[in-house]
Amino acid sequence: MNRITSQLATQLSLVSLDGGRRTEPPALVLVAHGSRDPRTLRTVHTLVERVRELRPGLPVRLGHIELNEPLLPDTLASLGTGEAVLVPLLLSRGYHVKRDIPEMAAACAARTRVATPLGPHPLLVEALHGRLVEAGWRTTMDEATRRASAVVLAAAGSRDPDSAVDTGRTAHLLSERLGVPVVPAYASAATPTVETAVRALAARGRHRVAVASYFTAPGLFATQSAQKAPWIASAPLGTHPAMARLLLHRYDQSLASTAATEPALASA
């Protein structure tokens, strides 16, 4: 089924907005933040390869907002006047999604559109759940254990209120999946902190608290958040299979949205 869906998506991407046929689909440019931690770069490169494996024939490029090469402006410059969909490897709305990436896209000659960030989405919940199970979360538990259990969803944090809204929605979806409270918390720029959230849950009788790492790759924030876990801490989302599928979903979603709105705008 996944292969059939991928083939259909590739065929759709080969149809241009005027109904003609492109020689190749618009490139998917995975936009990563960038990090000094070499594990982050390895994770991003692996994700790029996973996307290529899932969608053979789709041009997949990588661009960083800062700290790592290739930088996004250089990746976009290499496309010339070609078409591309920029898919942020970011989990919520915030300054990078609203300002940095669109401004870099507007400054290049390529014909670009910017996809929505990865979260919130059920595929992220699938990845979070999978990482928690890997860390020791039991998929079945008795009622007493359930009443004592909870999860802190540890995210990077942002001053943008939309970021907190998106993280809160993911926490709600994960809570529905697990059947226990899930409290969003942040490593920086927002409250509550992971430590504060853990204490608040303990005050409510939730002493079996797991920390779910809501980070795309290993790094300082993920490590610091995991160290606050009173019980288990899951690994970052990283190269979980759902992540590559979600990147392609955001790419396809952006193409479908543009194809649906462009004719309406032209006839207005």
Image (cartoon, rainbow, N blue to C red):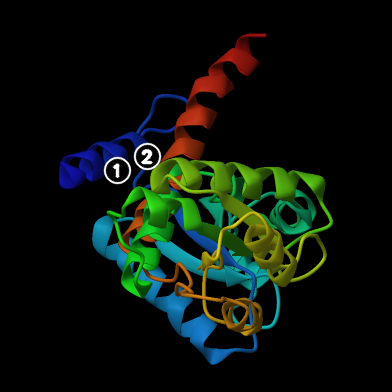
Q: Residue at x 47, y 66 (%)?
A: 61
Q: Is residue 143 above or below residue 56?
A: above
Contact, CB < 8 Å: mark 2 with mark 1?
yes
How far is the residue under mark 2 from the one under mark 1? 5 Å
Q: Is residue 95 left or right of residue 38?
A: right
Q: Is residue 2 above or below residue 52?
A: above
Q: Quadrant of residue 176?
A: top left
Assess disc 1: are there few (<14), some (14-19) or many (≥20) residues with their C-alpha within 10 Å of its C-alpha. some
Indicate the amino acid at tag 2.
Answer: Ser
- Which corner quadrant holds the N terminus? top left
Residue 42: give x, y in percent of width and height.
Answer: 45, 84
Q: Is residue 126 above or below residue 185?
A: above
Residue 152: give x, y in percent of width and height.
Answer: 59, 61
Q: Secondary structure at mark 1?
A: helix
Q: Which residue is mark 2?
A: 13
Assess disc 2: are there few (<14), some (14-19) or many (≥20) residues with their C-alpha within 10 Å of its C-alpha. many
Indicate the amino acid at tag 1.
Answer: Thr
Q: Is residue 186 left or right of residue 150?
A: right
Q: Residue at x 48, y 27 (%)?
A: 259
Q: Is residue 192 left or right of residue 109?
A: right
Q: Quadrant of residue 191?
A: bottom right
Q: Secondary structure at mark 2?
A: helix
148 and 111: which is toward the camera = 148
Residue 84: give x, y in percent of width and height.
Answer: 52, 51
Q: Which residue is mark 1?
A: 10
Picture disc at residue 23: none
Residue 109: give x, y in percent of width and height.
Answer: 66, 55
